[in-house]
């Protein structure tokens, strides 16, 4: 049986959400969801990072850590190139590689199965509308090393339920992910809690909230 190797690319920097990859999400650093899901289906889980805090956290959860160079941590370096770099540095030649995004708390380990069983690339997508799911994709180690285009005639689209899709790039995406996760797990939506707090503060100050804005007469 071919080894299943998960690679989680997790930079320390983020252009739009500060320290996004280890930001708290319902009581845990968000990357922990990706790590634990990957550990359920893969024989090895490797976190690639240039950040010491992320590296230590990954080690504490039982992951291998790939020390990414600062050159490979630049904004313009894509995840396929990062995966190829990991495979080369760690001398992994034969494996089914699952690349999991560090901010993918909505997916479940079961979502990975179809991607892992396909021979070519398999990419998680949302269907309403059809778009990149911002969660994971898989391919052979050889395809990653040779930089075969992600979308080709052999690529399979793994369609995820809309409630498990959220590509987190902006603060608004983070809030959407929180709402979806809360609905999935029967938790209170943090946004509702925030709104209630603002309303309570406004009330104590003799004001009110209108269209999401606190108004103090």
Image (tube, rainbow, N blue to C red):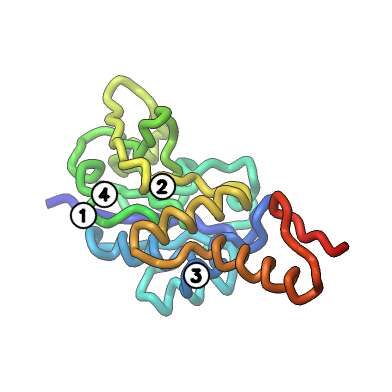
Dot 3 or dot 2: first in sequence order is: 3
CA distance separating discs 1 and 3: 27 Å
First in sequence, mark 3 or 4: give its number.
Answer: 3
Q: Badge 2 is on which residue?
A: 135
Which of the 4 image quarters holds residue 217? bottom right
Q: Residues within 10 Å of mark 4 (few under 14, many from 20)?
A: many
Q: Which corner quadrant of the image does residue 114 belong to?
A: top left
Which of disc 1 and disc 4 is earlier in sequence? 1
Q: Position of residue 60 (x, y in %)?
A: 42, 79
Please indicate whether residue 183 sits to the left or right of residue 140 in the image.
Answer: right
Q: Are marks 3 and 4 in contact (CB under 8 Å)?
A: no
Q: Which callout, 4 or 1, points to the residue nearer the camera?
A: 4
Q: Is residue 96 above or below residue 54?
A: above
**Residue 132 x/y as whole percent:** 44, 35
Residue beneath disc 3: 29
Give residue 204's mark. Answer: none
Contact (Cβ within 8 Å) of mark 4 with mark 1: no
Whether residue 175 is situated above or below residue 167 in the rendered picture: below
In the foreground, 182 or 107: 182
Q: Earlier in the sequence, mark 2 or mark 1?
A: 1
Residue sitting at x 38%, y 49%: 99
Task: Please give the residue where the numbered disc 4 appears in the rendered image.
Answer: 112
Front: mark 2 or 1: 2
Q: Nearer the viewer, residue 133 or 204?
A: 204
| Residue 122 location (% of width, % of height) | 30, 36
Would you name the residue on which mark 1 appears?
A: 3
Measured Cα–Cα span from mark 2 to mark 1: 21 Å
Above/below status of 103 relative to 126 = below
């Amino acid at each position: 049986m071919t080894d299943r190797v998960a690679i989680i690319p997790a930079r320390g920097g983020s252009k739009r959400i500060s320290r996004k990859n280890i930001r708290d999400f319902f009581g845990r650093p968000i990357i922990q969801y990706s790590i634990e899901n990957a550990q359920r289906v893969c024989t090895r889980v490797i976190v690639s990072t240039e950040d010491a805090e992320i590296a230590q956290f990954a080690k504490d959860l039982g992951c291998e850590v790939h020390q990414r160079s600062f050159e490979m941590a630049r904004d313009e370096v894509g995840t396929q190139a990062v995966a190829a770099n990991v495979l080369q540095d760690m001398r992994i030649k034969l494996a089914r590689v699952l690349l999991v995004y560090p901010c993918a708390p909505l997916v479940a380990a079961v979502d990975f199965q179809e991607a892992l069983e396909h021979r070519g690339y398999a990419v998680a997508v949302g269907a309403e509308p059809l778009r990149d799911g911002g969660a994971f994709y898989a391919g052979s180690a050889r395809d990653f090393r040779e930089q075969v285009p992600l979308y080709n005639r052999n690529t399979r689209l793994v369609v995820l339920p809309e409630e498990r899709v959220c590509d987190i790039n902006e603060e608004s995406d983070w809030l959407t992910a929180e709402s979806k996760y809360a609905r999935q797990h029967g938790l209170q939506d943090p946004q509702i809690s925030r709104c209630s707090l603002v309303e309570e503060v406004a009330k104590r100050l003799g004001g009110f909230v209108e269209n999401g804005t606190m108004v103090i007469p």
